Amino acid sequence: MSSAEQTRLRILDSATTEFARHGIAGARVDRVALGAGVSKPMIYTYFGSKSGLFDAVFEAHVIANGDRVPFTPEDLPGYAVRLYEDYVADPSLVRLLMWKRLEREPDGYLYPGMEDLDDAHVRDIEDRQRAGELRADLTPEDVWALLISMASTWAQSSLTAVATATDPQSVHDRRSRALAHAVGAMLLP
């Protein structure tokens, strides 16, 4: 890996911490620079602006989540559990999603310009519905939304309890079983 790529990754890592903690408006580029061990102008050279830096951090986490948790339309309960586990492993992801929703996209699609990420999943759901493998009385988009919402029940955006990596494994196992059962009962015919 080149020195430039290492620098870029250090900046993204520091910016992830900063944006997850403070949001877009509250984040400070000087703190990102300090955390990454680079100058503030270097950040602007790499990303153009604080907004461009947030976009890069956001995209990196969303794409990494998709790579770590491939969508399996033939096993929605298992997919939901793997997504839950990834939210626990990468708590910054949900915080970044919530900051973007709060500060940039208060309604509509959360990932403008990245719609193709979900479009393929929605088409897979629709295929499964036509085959009689998923409830057909919901739109494919509603199945997708319910699936993601259920998987994030204990994520950092939770209105009740937030799961953490320090919770006992027995608690994660209980939540995983409950989630798989709920997804199956709600979305499978």
Image: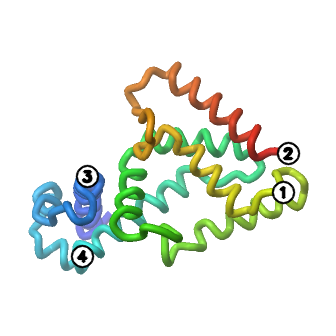
Q: CA distance from mark 1 to mark 2?
A: 8 Å
Mark closest to the chain's N terminus, 3 or 2? 3
What residue does disc 3 label?
A: 17
Give percent across and percent down for residue 133. Answer: 86, 50
The residue shown at (64%, 50%) is 147
Its colouring scheme is: rainbow
The residue shown at (82%, 63%) is 127
Q: Are marks 4 and 2 in contact (CB under 8 Å)?
A: no
Question: In the image, is 105 to the left or to the right of 135?
Answer: left
Give percent across and percent down for residue 142. Answer: 68, 59
Q: Check residue 136 in the rendering and tell me which mark sits there, or answer none.
A: 1
What residue does disc 2 label?
A: 189
Q: CA distance from mark 4 to mark 2?
A: 49 Å
What residue does disc 4 label?
A: 46
Q: Are marks 3 and 2 in contact (CB under 8 Å)?
A: no
Residue 29, compared with residue 35, is above or below; it is below
Q: Which three-letter amino acid code belongs to the residue tagged 3?
A: Thr
Specify the quadrant that holds the N terminus: bottom left
Instruction: Pick the residue in front: 154 or 67.
Output: 154
Give percent across and percent down for residue 124. Answer: 75, 62
- In this view, the mark in front (4 or 2): 2
Give percent across and percent down for residue 22. Answer: 23, 55
Specify the quadrant that holds the C terminus: top right
Picture quadrant of residue 89: top left
Secondary structure at badge 3 equals helix
Q: Which three-letter amino acid code belongs to the residue tagged 1?
A: Ala
Secondary structure at badge 2 equals loop
Mark closest to the chain's N terminus, 1 or 3? 3
The residue shown at (26%, 76%) is 47
